[in-house]
Amino acid sequence: MRILAIESSCDETAAAVVDDGRRLLSSIVASQDELHAETGGVVPEVAARQHLRAIGPVVRRALADAETTWDAIDAIGATAGPGLPGALAVGFATARAIAFARSLPLIPVDHIEGHVCAAWLGEREPPLPALALVVSGGHTELLLMEDHGRFRRLGGTRDDAAGEAFDKVARLLSLGYPGGPPISRLARTASGRDLRLPRAWLPGSDDFSFSGLKTAVLRVVRGPDPPPAAEVAWAFEESVADVLSRKATRAATREGVASLLVAGGVAANGRLRERLRERALLPLFIPPPALCTDNAAMIGAAAFRHRHEAVDPRASLDIAPTAARGQAALGRTAP
Ligand code: KG4
Ligand code: ZN
């Protein structure tokens, strides 16, 4: 089954062609990073308008790169939420229009489930049940994945998402947007490695918290004798990688799962990947960085798993690309 997938929930306009939810034929991502660097964050209205400009060319390129024609496409998958409503609407409406015009099934996909399904695009197939840590700009979720579409939420952030913390600290250090990559680059140049920033362990809970860490960074940077920015970046990254890796690997051991999946933009972080590899006592699946940050290949992988839940685009007027629907998809639990 060949799926054309579309993703536009935040600030990447993306399209991909995926066979049987496993084989990636093409993946095109048009990033809006430069556009949002000016404002140091995503302005929803600006993002939506840019999606509108990019979506046509991105879809055409995904088909061309996959060397496929419309006739070979069996279904359209699209992110239905959660995300920025205006941004989601562009991708979802495009997907619906294509499905309608070509009489193809339309498969709505939950963005977070999409991130998790990126693990199925690799060589090995992750054994289930799995523990999934999804760390992105909008989400920090620890999920028990019993099967495709069957998730139990163990915990999540109580305040900032992990990626959001990277973005906010980057702003404090006058680095660009998104904050993850420049913080990592700067951290690698740190000569002093004495600064220790707090870790919110929240004992007995699978939740996370990053606001205290952010405040600690603020205090250090605005303090009387601030250390070099590189040292602050290094200590911040250490703290985040330490907490995420330890809590995820511990929960995986406790739940007795068969694999640990890590996904979302922050999973592209080199230090976090290192710490997870050190600590994981079970098969660990982290997609290559390009499949960690937002992309449509992961949406194609997830759409295949939900192919029997396709909707008729003509009858789907009631399917709103809202955050609520996305959350609902992840809420599907085992009986
Ligand atoms: O998954 P994603 O592309 O979009 C959302 O669904 O939010 O994640 C974007 C987030 C941003 O906050 C960005 O700073 C962070 O992921 N990120 C990173 C890295 N690359 C992206 N954080 C840490 N290290 C990285 N290398
Ligand atoms: Zn994402």
Image (cartoon, grey):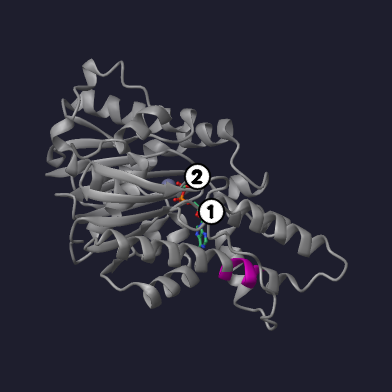
Q: Residues within 10 Å of mark 2 (few under 14, many from 20)?
A: some
Which residue is under mark 1? 163
Q: Nearer the viewer, residue 279 or 69?
A: 279
Query: Mark 2 is on which residue type?
Result: Gly
- Up the image or down, 214 lies above or below 323; here it is below
Q: Are marks 1 and 2 in contact (CB under 8 Å)?
A: yes
Q: Is residue 15 visible?
A: no
- Ligand 1 within 8 A of label 1's CB? yes
Mark 1 or mark 2: name the one nearer the start of the chain: 2
Q: Position of residue 254 (x, y in %)?
A: 31, 62
What's the residue at 36%, 22% (across, down)? 320
Start-end of magenta stretch: 233-238
Left or right for 281, reference 272: left
Horizontal relation, residue 20 to residue 247: left or right: left
Q: Amino acid at mark 1?
A: Gly
Residue that badge 2 annotates: 138
Quadrant placement of the N terminus = top left
Q: Residue at x 53, y 49 (%)?
A: 161
